[in-house]
Amino acid sequence: MILVNFFHIKATNGLFYYGLDYVKDNLDLVHKVLVRPELTHRVKDALPHIEVSACSNLRFLIEVIQACYNGDLLYTPTSHPLPLIDRQWVVLHDAYPFTLGPKSQLKRFLFKWSLAMSRCRVAYINRSEAKPFVADLGVAPRRMVFAPNRFPEASSHVSSLSSPNGVTTVGLFGTDSAKKNYDRLFSVVRATELSSRLAFRVYGHETAYLRDIQGQFPDIQIELVRSDDVSIDAFMSDVDVLTSVSEQEGFGRPFASALLAGLPVELLDRPVFREFFTGGACFHSSIDALVRSLLRCGDSRLSHVTYTAPAEAVEAYASANAEISRLGSIALR
C-alpha cells in the first residue's frame, strides 16, 4: 500500500497538482494522505474516496512510523526525504531552495544528509537541470528515476487575441518566491516605457512577495487572480499571452496547458523550457527581447499555436507511475 505525504506542501501550487496526478493514477493502492490542516478540504475535494489525515508534527511522525511498521511505500512529491526509511519515493522539482532560496546552504546539507541516510528512490522532473543536481549530491544512478509532470489534456480554449484599447493582457503563474524574477520583468517594462500597453494578471495566491512587487511597481497594472477561486482554463481565456522570466523552474505545468490550448507562450531561452516546450513556445535570449515580443501577441492576426507534448516525457510519466504502482503493490508484511 501507499501512504501519501503532502505534509510539506503549504498551498495549492505546482507541487500540489504534480502530486495529485500521480496519486490519482494509483488510487487503488493509496490508503491515506497526510496533509497540513489548512489543505485538508482541498485534498478531500480532489480525492473524495481516500482517507485524509490533518497532521500536527507529532501526528505526522506517528503516521510515518505506522506506515514503516506496515511496510507501506511513503510517496512524497516534494524534496523532503526522511532518514532511515528505504521504502520512500521523493521528488526534486528544482534546485532553487538549495542554491538561491532562504537558508539554501542549510537546506542543501539536510537534503544531502537525509538522502545519504536512506536508500529511497529519488525522482527528478527534468533531465536538463534537476537530474544533474541530484547526481551532484552523490545519489547513485540506480536510485534515480525520471518522473516528469503529467501533460494535461488539450483544452477547448481558443484565444481571440483581441486586445481592447491596444493593451496586451499578459498571464503570469506563481506568487511563491523571488525565483519568479518579477522585479526584473517589471523593471524592463518600466524602462522600455510599455507600462500603458501591457497589463499583467498573476495566477496564484496572495503572498508577501507579490504585495512587495505590487508596491514596487504601482505604475504597472498587476492584478492577482486567486487560483483557489478561478480555474486555469478560465484564467487563460482572459489573457492574450503567457510568459515567464524565471530561471529556476522545474517544468511549467501551466505553459503545457496553454500551448495545448493554442495560446501563445513567450519564455526565456532556458534548458528546462527547451526540454518540454520546443515546437510550441517562443524563446528569447533576454528579458528585454521577451517584453517587446509581448506586444505583438495582442495582434488579432497572430496565428494559432500548434503544439504536441514530447513523447519521451509522456512515456516517462507512464513509466514512473508504473514503478510507483509496483513498489506500492509489494507486500512486506
Image (cartoon, rainbow, N blue to C red):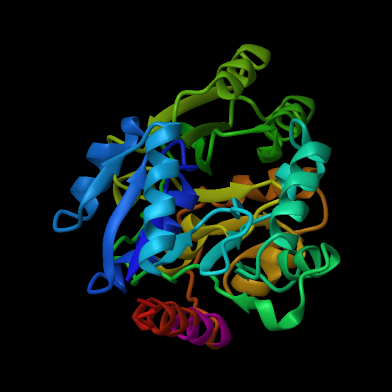
Image quadrant containing the C terminus: bottom left
Q: Residue 263 colored magenta?
A: no
Which SS type dominates the magenta stretch? helix
In x, y percent, where is residue 100? 80, 39
Q: In this view, does 110 lie to the left or right of 126?
A: right
**Residue 135 appears in which quarter of the rendering?**
bottom right
Decide: is 195 above or below 79.
Answer: above
**Residue 97 appears in which quarter of the rendering?**
top right
Q: Is residue 245 left or right of residue 49?
A: right
Q: Is residue 212 visible?
A: yes
Decide: is 57 above or below 212.
Answer: below
Residue name at image x 60 percent, y 66 percent: 281
Q: What stretch is highlighted in magenta?
A: 312-319
Residue situated in front as seen by the camera: 194 or 66: 66
**Residue 143 appears in which quarter of the rendering?**
bottom right
In x, y percent, where is residue 305? 49, 69
Q: Can residue 161 be seen in this view?
A: no
